[in-house]
Amino acid sequence: MSPLKRHPKNPILTPREMPFPCYTVMNTGATWFEDKVLLILRVEYCDRETHFHIATSEDGIRFDIEPSPVELPLTRVETVYGEQHHFDARITRIDDTYYINYAIYLSRWGCCIATAITRDFKSFEVLPFTSEPSNRNAVLFPEKIGGHFARLDRPQDVNGNGEIWISYSPDLQFWGRHLPLDIPHRMWNKGKSGAGAVPIRTPKGWLEIYHATAATCSSLNYYLGAALLDLEDPSKVIAAPRSYVLAAEEVYECVGQTPNVVFTGGAVAMPDGTLNVYYGGADTRLCLAQTTVDDLVSFCLGG
């Protein structure tokens, strides 16, 4: 049985609870900042444009939403071609600096990865594109490995299909030593997959919560999975259970903009030891599932 349990107040955020009209509030980056849980929400307005909004909470359940969107400096390509479509942020803290990896959609080429750097979530420095199209689901490890930054991402084809790869960089701009993660294919993860939460260091390995898909007779279903990666060489998969940890089953996960979706972009360890895993339900609303790091590691090793 999966250790990941849905919160009874799910969904914890819906478009109706936002302080402005919007169509969806979903996939979110998550971190701990100034004694609060901080989320960078993906919000689609009623004109279907996508924006980031910051939300904060003392208990990780009830959130205060910033009514104004995050104003990230545009990259050169966005400026030249007049496009701005940011989504699916992940937040990694290293020392006192926060690195936000997010996807940018460009209509001429598809998705690519950008990185914003901040210390206060008010002012941001944006690096040049840190990938070519098409790539997304970039997640930065919370410490250097072998003296280099390490990142999980998903190079993908024109249909958006692909799997999780790892690469390394001396400066967050030039990436190399690309390798795929050899996560075994099961019936639930044999479609596309992508890194979700920032990897968590444990004595048994890096704990990664990711999403994966599999086609059914009527739809493409999303699942959340967990895996342990080697601490010194995270391209090596130590454990990947046969079972998923969460599937789209509840109405708020199955009915919405994209049916049958559970998609995580962030997990936060709470002061009481609970691991809050935030995930989007049906690409429409924000949900919460909870476990502990130890229970999730045991699930990986026992599966």
Image (cartoon, rainbow, N blue to C red):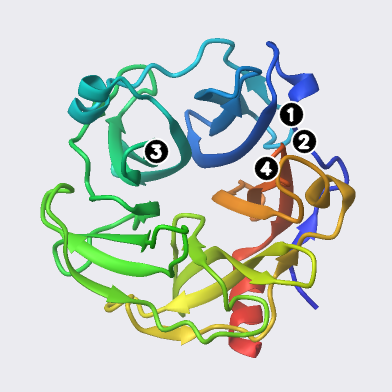
Q: Name the residue under label 3.
A: 105
Compute the Cα span from label 4 to label 3: 17 Å
Compute the Cα span from label 3 to label 1: 31 Å
Quadrant placement of the C terminus: bottom right
Hey, what amino acid is under mark 4?
Asp
* Residue 273 in the image: above or below residue 255: below
> Which SS class for mark 2?
loop
Compute the Cα span from label 1 to label 2: 7 Å
Q: Quadrant of residue 11?
A: top right
Which mark is on residue 201? none
* Residue 70 in the image: above or below residue 126: above
Res 133 visible: yes
Hey, what amino acid is under mark 3?
Tyr
Sequence-earlier tag: 4 or 3? 3
Closest to the camera, between mark 4 and mark 2, is 4
Task: Give the percent coordinates (x, y) of residue 240.
Answer: 55, 83
Identify the residue at image location x=48%, y=62%: 194
Q: Name the residue under label 1.
A: 62
Q: Name the residue under label 2.
A: 12
> Which SS class for mark 4?
loop
Sequence-earlier tag: 1 or 2? 2
Identify the residue at image location x=68%, y=26%: 63
User: Dot 4 surroundings within 10 Å: few (below 14), some, or many (20 or more)?
Assistant: many
